[in-house]
């Protein structure tokens, strides 16, 4: 009986390629999400760091510019308070300043003034007197030969009082007995830079003005001394708000409902451990800020998603711009930009000439007048071709330029942009937004200062030239103005240098976008083809393996049959003489004195040719062997004259069976 089987594909193996591809897509999607999150986090971190650096630079520029503006006036006419606004890069900076004469000086204020300030800020009268005594003890040197009672108060704190002038208002935190909350309240109203016991009431805060009135013995029922700048910013000061009744219930002083009782400071705070937290409290400028209300969770998530998409789009546009700039730079190495000099004449016309004349380029200058941003008369065809893709260098007349020589401290070299921009409205008839201005490289002069040549003109003078250059297809335009340096030497100031289009053409960003979209589409099509073709090839491979498995199973099942392939092979192996076995049998039969020179096996016959001493005996020996029968000579036996043995030619039939497993 012949058994047959049907070996099919396992259902678990079906769709294996699709599952693998899906896992790969999932892994790639995870990597893309992780990478995008990393890029977003990195962008936010870099933006925060960049914002911090920009803020620090803007604060430094504001301080430098304010100090510079104040030094421009003499001491008698110098303002006691004011505000300054200027733009730097994309930021708008507002600086508010006021003189330290509106604050109490910790080193020179009388004890009565200090007591009055402490009472106004909400302290009880006995506590205010104790605080004032401690401040006076901190700043007063003990008399020679007397007992230092003040130093004994600090033995438990681990340090000694300065018993000298305050060097910083934050030293108030080291004075024994003054609570930390009260120190924070006092800091906005005290200074160490007043230099005297008096306070200017026109710029003093209401709290300081009331403290002065109390020290003078006046019983005021209303806040006074809040005129001018102080009254304007009274609500924005860092001091407390007015209350209907004071802590002691006697006067309508300024108070805080969290002040009574005042907590005592820990030794770490007394030793100045909280100084970094209070750094900048004594600055004269006032910074106002508003805090936005927290967004709802859903809107916050939507906002974060929109922010991430905006960041991704911004990154994509930046990448496009960077690649376009790189392409433009590479193109600039192989393409030399044509330069056209455009000089303004006395009658308001312009004369254009090529800086370097080439073959096929116009060699004669051309003059024209601008009329509605277009040259009149119209330019010849060769000049239009010359303007296309060229760099236009415009040189204005000196009577159209406002020129100045400016000097600054050498440390201001890093802030020239902001400092000069803030003075445009003072140096020229125009504001910074309505002027096109520039300056030369700073040159060092005496007294550790630098000097620059400044030049400016109206933006309405330059804008028609830019529009004309863009209309003619120019690659860039630069505007220069004559200026005179401090030494009288003529200089050239660049007022504007603007790129209108790249050398590689305006289509590079568009081509990059098309290329990226095409690449993404090709990748998607390749992935789909891979999924489809991969599945088809896998199906074909599985079908082929299935057929091979069926044939192998059939061969294994028919191995015992005579007509099977394995049976035929086994029968042929058993019935076909083996050359090695025939040679071994011949070696056993022939005597040691016989030498075989030829051995041929043809079918079931073997022919042996060689030399022996007794050729007829070989027939008998072969007949006696079970592997050979019907041995005979198939050629005559001969003996050569120079040979001592007989040359024989014997053939015999080979037994057809050598045994199973032989």
Image: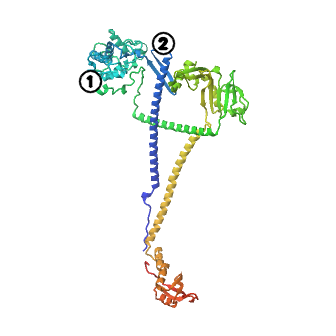
Residue at 45% in and 15% down: 80
x then y, percent, for residue 169: 36, 21
Q: Is residue 34 above or below residue 637?
A: above
| Residue picked out by circle 1 | 155
Please identify the residue farthest to the right as the structure is shown. Answer: 364
Q: Is residue 389 above or below residue 645?
A: above
x then y, percent, for residue 231: 41, 14
Q: Which mark is residue 555?
A: none
Q: Quadrant of the N terminus?
A: bottom left
Q: Secondary structure at mark 1?
A: helix
The numbered mark, 2 or 1, whose residue comes first in the sequence reads 2
Disc 2 residue crowd, few under 14, some 14–19, many 20+, Cα 10 Å: few
Q: CA distance from mark 2 to mark 1?
A: 49 Å
Q: Which sits in the foreground, 488 or 557?
A: 488
| Residue picked out by circle 2 | 77
Q: Is residue 634 above or below residue 477?
A: below
x then y, percent, for residue 41: 44, 38
Q: Which sits in the foreground, 220 or 204?
A: 204
Q: Which sits in the foreground, 556 or 595?
A: 595
Quadrant in which residue 298 is drawn: top left
95 relative position to 510: left or right: left
65 relative position to 260: left or right: right
Using the rendered image of the protein, determine whether residue 7 is visible from the camera's viewpoint: yes
Disc 1 residue crowd, few under 14, some 14–19, many 20+, Cα 10 Å: few
């Amino acid at each position: 009986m012949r058994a047959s089987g049907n070996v099919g594909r396992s259902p678990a193996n079906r769709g294996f390629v699709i599952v693998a591809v899906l896992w790969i897509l999932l892994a790639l999607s995870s990597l893309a999400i992780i990478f995008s999150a990393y890029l977003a986090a990195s962008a936010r971190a870099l933006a925060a760091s960049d914002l911090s650096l920009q803020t620090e630079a803007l604060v430094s520029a504001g301080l430098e510019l304010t100090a510079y503006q104040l030094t421009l006036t003499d001491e008698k006419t110098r303002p006691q308070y004011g505000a300054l606004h200027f733009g730097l890069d994309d930021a708008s900076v507002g600086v508010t300043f006021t003189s330290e004469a509106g604050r109490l000086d910790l080193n020179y204020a009388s004890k009565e003034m200090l007591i009055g300030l402490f009472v106004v800020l909400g302290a009880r009268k006995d506590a205010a007197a104790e605080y004032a005594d401690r401040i006076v003890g901190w700043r007063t040197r003990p008399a020679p030969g007397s007992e230092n009672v003040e130093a004994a108060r600090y033995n438990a704190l681990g340090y000694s009082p300065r018993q000298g002038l305050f060097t910083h208002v934050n030293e108030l935190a080291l004075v024994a007995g003054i609570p930390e909350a009260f120190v924070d309240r006092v800091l906005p109203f005290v200074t160490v830079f007043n230099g005297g016991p008096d306070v200017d009431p026109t710029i003093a805060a209401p709290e300081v003005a009331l403290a002065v009135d109390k020290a003078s013995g006046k019983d005021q029922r209303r806040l006074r001394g809040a005129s001018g700048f102080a009254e304007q910013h009274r609500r924005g000061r860092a001091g407390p708000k007015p209350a209907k009744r004071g802590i002691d219930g006697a006067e309508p002083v300024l108070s805080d409902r969290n002040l009574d009782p005042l907590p005592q400071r820990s030794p770490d705070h007394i030793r100045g451990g909280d100084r970094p937290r209070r750094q900048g409290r004594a600055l004269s400028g006032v910074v106002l800020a508003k805090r936005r209300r927290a967004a709802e969770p859903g809107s916050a998530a939507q906002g974060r998603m929109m922010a991430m998409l905006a960041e991704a789009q911004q990154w994509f546009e930046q990448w496009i711009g960077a690649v376009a700039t790189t392409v433009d730079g590479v193109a600039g190495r192989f393409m030399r930009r044509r330069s056209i000099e455009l000089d303004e004449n006395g009658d308001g016309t312009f004369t254009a000439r090529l800086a370097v004349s080439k073959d096929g380029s116009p060699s004669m200058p051309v003059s024209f007048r601008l009329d509605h941003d277009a040259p009149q008369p119209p330019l010849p065809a060769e000049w239009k071709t010359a303007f296309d893709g060229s760099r236009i260098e415009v040189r204005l007349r000196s009577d159209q330029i406002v020129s100045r020589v400016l000097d600054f401290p050498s440390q201001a070299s890093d802030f020239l942009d902001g400092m000069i921009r803030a003075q445009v409205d003072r140096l020229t008839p125009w504001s910074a937004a309505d002027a096109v201005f520039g300056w030369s490289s700073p040159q060092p002069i005496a007294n550790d200062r630098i000097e620059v040549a400044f030049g400016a003109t109206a933006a309405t003078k330059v804008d028609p030239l830019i529009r004309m250059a863009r209309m003619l297809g120019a690659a860039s335009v630069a505007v220069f103005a004559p200026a005179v340096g401090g030494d009288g030497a003529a200089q050239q100031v660049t007022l504007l240098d603007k790129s209108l289009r790249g050398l590689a053409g305006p289509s590079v960003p568009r081509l990059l976008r098309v290329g990226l979209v095409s690449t993404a589409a090709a990748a998607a099509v390749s992935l789909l083809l891979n999924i489809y073709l991969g599945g088809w090839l896998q199906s074909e491979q599985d079908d082929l393996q299935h057929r091979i498995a069926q044939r192998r199973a059939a061969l294994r099942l028919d191995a015992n049959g005579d007509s099977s392939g394995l049976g035929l092979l086994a029968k042929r192996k058993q019935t076909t003489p083996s050359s090695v076995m025939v040679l071994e049998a011949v070696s056993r039969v022939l005597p040691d004195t016989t030498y075989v020179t030829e051995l041929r096996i043809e079918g079931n016959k073997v022919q042996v040719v060689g030399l022996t001493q007794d050729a007829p005996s070989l027939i008998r020996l072969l007949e006696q062997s079970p592997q050979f029968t019907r041995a005979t000579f198939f050629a005559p036996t001969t003996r050569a004259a120079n040979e001592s043995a007989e040359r024989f030619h014997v053939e015999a039939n080979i037994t057809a069976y050598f045994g199973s497993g032989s």
